Image: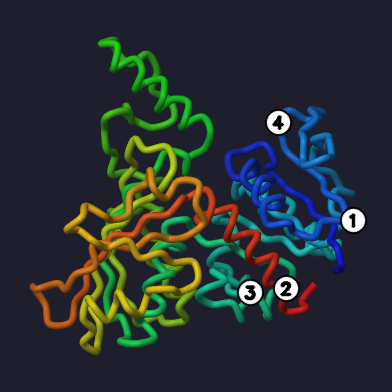
Amino acid sequence: MKKYNVVIVGALGAVGNEFRKILLQRKFPINKIKFVDLVDVGSVVDFGDMKVTVEAPSADTFKGYDIALFSAGADVSLQIARDAAKDGCIVIDNSSAWRMDPEVPLVVPEVNPDDVKWHKGIIANPNCSTIQMLLPLKHIHDMAKIKRIVVSTYQAVSGTGLKAIEECLKQAAEVSRGESVSKVSVYPHQIAFNALPHIDVFLDNGYTKEEMKMVNETRKIMGDNSIKVSATAVRIPVIYGHSESINIETEKKITADEVRKLLQGKPGITVVDNPAKNEYPMPIYAAGKDDVFVGRIREDESIENGINMWVVSDNIRKGAALNTIQIAELLIEKGLI
């Protein structure tokens, strides 16, 4: 089997850490690997049996490398991703930088795998909330055509990064001890024991940038601009695992039982839907796992063709690192690298 030279940009962040774990877990065919970051340059990180020194990005970073997994933020991606592509290194970017660029495919391997074929050196990884929503909805769309999606997300602090995790845990400990919260810096308000209907910046239309990502990315990935999407994104004090309450309206009638049967056994999806036994998806169940978990499937009794569901996934794995690595595996599978 051919082996590949891989660069991880943002190797020490929350998603970068997960990149390293998943590459080893999935036995990705690596010849050599390079870790790039803007912090702790010169530090040595274990990778399997290897010890890898963290480097700063440079003009020669990507020369001789095949794949670059980016998770260092949009600014870094905009600065150096094109340079990597020019050096013949295919970039799979986890930031928002390239998602809506018409010349950059936006890919969920279980949903639109063939879109990788038209890449020009950069492939975008979708927003974590969009990924987990579209895994089940793509199958329903193919069967009954979705007209409208209304989604509310309840997103874990790990989606903001390691500093958010640390601040949430510190605040929770302080409140539990009866103390005042000493520091609020990552979010505009205390996150522990709270819910913030505010993810990313507010836009002129009253929605946040995070909410509009779900609207626009859904249409691009599904290849259908007719789908209407309304999103509300909420940050909650959970460490790993985004949850979503999803309501859809379809053109054709589809029952809850048909949805369960349709999703059962589909790649990347686990149906957990037995309310009589208190079995339904939860973040603590999804954390550390690769699948998207779907439950609370029921018909919307307020409209003729409607379905409600509850969808949970580990935002750092399937919502970020795993999907990125699956795109790299897809490139290999299709002989595109």
Which residue is identified by label 4? Answer: 39
Q: Are marks 1 and 3 in contact (CB under 8 Å)?
A: no
Rate crowding at label 3 as few (under 14), some (14 to 19) or many (20 or more) other CA atoms within 10 Å.
some
Q: Is residue 74 above or below residue 276?
A: above
For this view, does 275 lie left or right of residue 290? left
Provide residue 216's location: percent of width, then percent of height: 42, 68
Which residue is identified by label 3? Answer: 103
> The N terminus lies in which quarter of the figure?
bottom right
Earlier along the polypeptide chain: callout 2 or callout 1? 1
Residue pictured at 37% horizontal, 38% vertical: 238
Earlier along the polypeptide chain: callout 4 or callout 2? 4
- For the residues labelled 1 and 3, the Cα–Cα distance comes to 23 Å
Amino acid of disc 4:
Val
Amino acid of disc 3:
Glu
Which residue is identified by label 1? Answer: 63
The reply to whether residue 207 is in sight is no
Q: Are marks 3 and 2 in contact (CB under 8 Å)?
A: yes
Which residue is identified by label 2? Answer: 120
The reply to whether residue 29 is in sight is yes
Residue pictured at 37% horizontal, 13% vertical: 182
- For the residues labelled 4 and 2, the Cα–Cα distance comes to 29 Å
Q: Is residue 82 above or below residue 75?
A: below
Amino acid of disc 1:
Lys
Which residue occupies the foreground of this view, 293 or 68? Answer: 293
